[in-house]
Amino acid sequence: MWIYEKKLQFPVNIKTPNPAFARIVMTQLGGPDGELGAANRYLSQRYVMPDSRVKGILTDIGTEELAPTRYKPCNRRR
């Protein structure tokens, strides 16, 4: 299970905006070769794998690719 906490891991103090660097960061997260695209590819490919071990690996990799986008694991038990 995942939980979203609107809190930064490290404090960020931006003195001057840098649009070029912001474009690079956004491309890495949401572009065709970014984290979200990679996660979608891994998670969608798992459905056609005949071997359950490979399915598990693709699920693990896809979930790990989602982690930097904005979610973090929730360790609470219900």
Image (spheres, grey):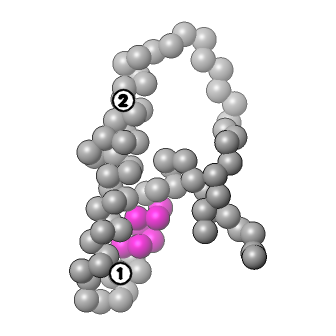
The quarter holding residue 74 reads bottom right
Q: Which amino acid does the dot numbered 2 rest on?
A: Ile
Q: Residue at x 60, y 62 (%)?
A: 2
Q: Residue at x 35, y 68 (%)?
A: 43
The quarter holding residue 12 reads top right
Please tell me whether the stretch drawn in magenta is mainly helix, strand or loop: helix
Q: Which amino acid does the dot numbered 1 rest on?
A: Lys
Residue corresponding to mark 2 = 24
Q: Does residue 61 lie above or below 23 as drawn?
A: below
Q: Residue furthest bottom?
A: 51
Q: Does residue 32 lie above or below 1 as drawn?
A: above
Q: Is residue 50 left or right of residue 59?
A: left
Between 15 and 2, the one nearer to me in the picture:
2
For label 2, count other residues whose C-alpha is less than 10 Å away and answer few (under 14), some (14-19) or many (20+): few
- Disc 1 is placed on an element classified as helix
For label 1, count other residues whose C-alpha is less than 10 Å away and answer few (under 14), some (14-19) or many (20+): some
Q: Residue at x 36, y 42 (%)?
A: 30
Where residue 31 appears, as percent x and y from the top left, is 31, 41
Q: Residue furthest front?
A: 78
Residue 9 in sight in this render? no
Q: Residue furthest top?
A: 16
Q: Does residue 41 lie above or below 52 as drawn?
A: above
Residue 78 in sight in this render? yes
In the image, the segment drawn in magenta is: 58-64
Q: CA distance from mark 2 to mark 1?
A: 32 Å
Q: Quadrant of the C terminus?
A: bottom right
Where residue 36 appears, as percent x and y from the top left, is 38, 51
Residue corresponding to mark 1 = 55
Q: Please check the rendered image and state whether residue 1 is part of the magenta-colored stretch, yes or no.
A: no
